[in-house]
Image: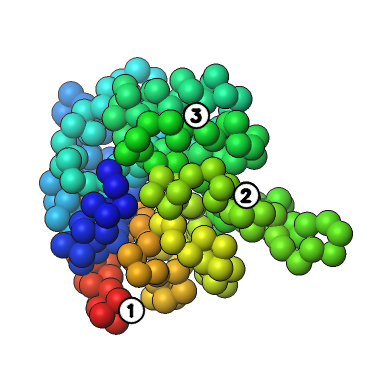
Amino acid sequence: MTREHLFKQILKKKSYLCIGLDTDPKKLPQHLLDFEDPVFEFNRQIVEATADLCVAYKPNIAFYEAQGPKGWISLEKTLQVIPEEIFTIADAKRGDIGNTSELYARAFFETMNFDSVTVAPYMGADSVKPFLVQGGKWVILLALTSNQGSQDFQMLKLADGNEEYLFEQVLRESANWASAGQMMYVVGATQAEYVQRVRAIVPDHFLLVPGVGAQGGSLEEISRLGMNQQCGLLVNSSRAIIYASSGEDFAEKAREAALEVQQEMEALLEQLLG
């Protein structure tokens, strides 16, 4: 999927919402446990209820890996019911030496046919570039995350009196590895005060922004600070949408929660892009 296609979807749906399919079997509505594949049935109903309100879905791969082979089957079936025009993100946070990364890329881009995969940059260029070989596929590089531990490394100041943080060096260096049409960055919504610094280095790239919703990030603030002329944002919400209800009305309540976010996004798009 190209950047232009993604932007067209944003304009068409008046939304830059990404819904995280972090489907925990322990949190499924009780009535779904009678289905042969409760995880898939949950995802299917969530997708059917929200597909017109979002431009991306982001399964967190750990939730499926933890279930063994049946989890991978649930994931593959889920991908099959996601409409083709919706951007898919394998939230896998991979990153290893080149030949291993080549196999990770093959797994998510060829076997599973995701549009993108999240990648950790700690091992450097040769661990990331194997994901950039296939045209039309994206790397979403971890840059500035919303967890408490992000302070441990990402916020370290560089040596020799340099006022840049380590995450800024990651942005600056990795921007040379691929164009804004193939690389995105993860920037947590709870790190909104640093978004202007991010945009100074990567003004044209899309940012995948977790942390809005259950984690307390501000959609208005991250949009005001991070939006560019092609929107340049995919704002993720997981728990606040998919677990809006634990009853038989879970899909209906998920739609209501997604609609509320979409309507706020529509207003922000009008305000910030005109």
Q: Residue at x 79, y 63 (%)?
A: 162
Q: Quadrant of the N terminus?
A: top left
Measured in 3D between alpha carbons, the distance from the residue under mark 2 to the one under mark 1, in whole angstroms, is 29 Å
Q: Which residue is mark 1?
A: 272
Tell me the kind of residue under disc 2.
Answer: Glu
Tell me the kind of residue under disc 3.
Answer: Pro
Q: Residue at x 38, y 49 (%)?
A: 181
Do labels 2 and 3 touch, CB within 8 Å?
Answer: no
Q: Residue at x 27, y 67 (%)?
A: 261
Measured in 3D between alpha carbons, the distance from the residue under mark 2 to the one under mark 3, in whole angstroms, is 16 Å
For residue 118, the mark is none
Looking at marks 2 and 3 on the same chain, the residue that comes earlier in the sequence is marked by 3
* 7, above or below 43, in the image: below
Q: Which residue is mark 2?
A: 173
Q: Is residue 106 left or right of residue 101?
A: left
Q: Residue 41 occupies which quadrant of the picture?
A: top left
Tell me the kind of residue under disc 1.
Answer: Leu
Residue 140 in view of the camera: no
Choose between 176 and 127: the one closer to the eye.
Answer: 176
Q: How is the image coloured?
A: rainbow
Residue furthest out toward the right = 160
Q: Residue at x 17, y 40 (%)?
A: 84
Q: Position of residue 253 (x, y in %)?
A: 19, 58
**Of tags 1 and 3, which is closer to the observer?**
3
**Of tags 2 and 1, which is closer to the observer?**
2
